[in-house]
Image: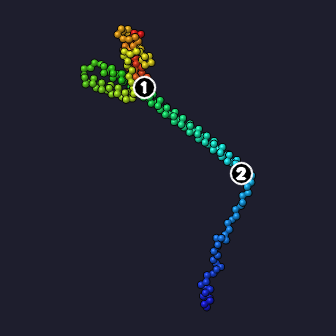
Amino acid sequence: MAEEEKEIIKPEAEDQPEPKDPKDEKEPEKAEEKPTEEKPEAENAELEKLKAENAELRDKYLRLLAEFDNYRKRSVKERQEIYPEATASAVAAFLPLADNFERAAGAECSDEKYKAGVMMIYDQLSNAFKKLGIEEIARVGETFDPSIENAVNQIEDENLKENSVAQVYQKGYRLGEKIIRPATVCVANV
C-alpha cells in the first residue's frame, strides 16, 4: 500500500510539457539575400526619383517663401501709403468747418464770452490738425508758388515784392508733401 500512495502523490510526467532549453531553440533561418544587379539599379533609380522630387519641393517652398515675403513687403508699403491718404481725406471733410470757425472768430461780436467759446473750439480744431501732422498754407509776403497756391486775383502794390502773395482768401492745408487743399490767394506785382 505504500507504493500505491507514492504513485498517487507522484505527479504524472505525461501531462506536463517538458521545459525547453533556450539553446535547443533554433532561430528561423533568414533567407540569404543574393546580391543581384537589378536591385542596386532599382534602388538607384528610386533614389534619383526621390532626389528629383525633393529638389522640386524645395524649389516650390523657396518660391512660396519669396512670394510671401513680397506680399508682406507690399502690404506694409500699402499700409504706409493708405494712412496719409485716409488722414487727408478725413481732414478734407473738416476744412469747411475750420473755415467757418475762423470766420466766426474774426467777426465782430458784442458777447465776449460767446466769442471766447468760438475761439476755444477753433483752437481745439487747429490743435487736432497739428497732432495729425496737418500744416496750414498761408504765406503772406512770400513768393507765389503755384504748386501749393491758387491765384484768383492780382494787384499792383509798391510795398510788396514782385510775384508775392498779397492776401490769403482761404488757407490751404497739407500733410507732409501731399496738398490737401491749395491756398486761395491774391498775388501782387505780376
Q: Nearer the viewer, residue 87 or 63?
A: 63
The answer to which of 173 and 165 lies nearer the viewer is 165
Q: Could you say where residue 183 lies in the image, as x and y percent from the top left?
A: 40, 19
Residue under the image location 49 percent in, 32 percent down: 77
Q: Which residue is mark 1?
A: 176
Q: Position of residue 84 (x, y in %)?
A: 44, 28
- As shown in the figure, which amino acid type bears the numbered disc 1? Gly
Figure check: 29 above or below 109: below
| Position of residue 46 in the picture relative to residue 140 (left or right) | right
Could you tell me if residue 169 is visible in this image?
A: no
Quadrant where the C terminus sits is top left
Q: Is residue 190 left or right of residue 64?
A: left
Please say if 169 is above or below 40. above
Find numbered disc 2 in the image and state the secondary structure of the residue it sits on: helix
Where 158 sits versus 8, above or below?
A: above
Place of residue 8 in the rendered image (x, y in percent of width and height, measured from the top left) = 61, 85
| Quadrant of the rendered image containing residue 184 | top left
**Residue at the image position 63 percent from the left and 77 percent from the top:** 16
The kind of residue tagged 2 is Pro
Q: How many marks?
A: 2
Q: Position of residue 101 (x, y in %)?
A: 33, 23
Which quarter of the rendered picture does the N terminus lie within?
bottom right
Q: Which residue is mark 2?
A: 40
Residue appearing at x 39%, y 13% in the figure: 164
- Helix, strand or loop at label 1? It is loop
Sequence order check: which comes first, mark 2 or mark 1?
2
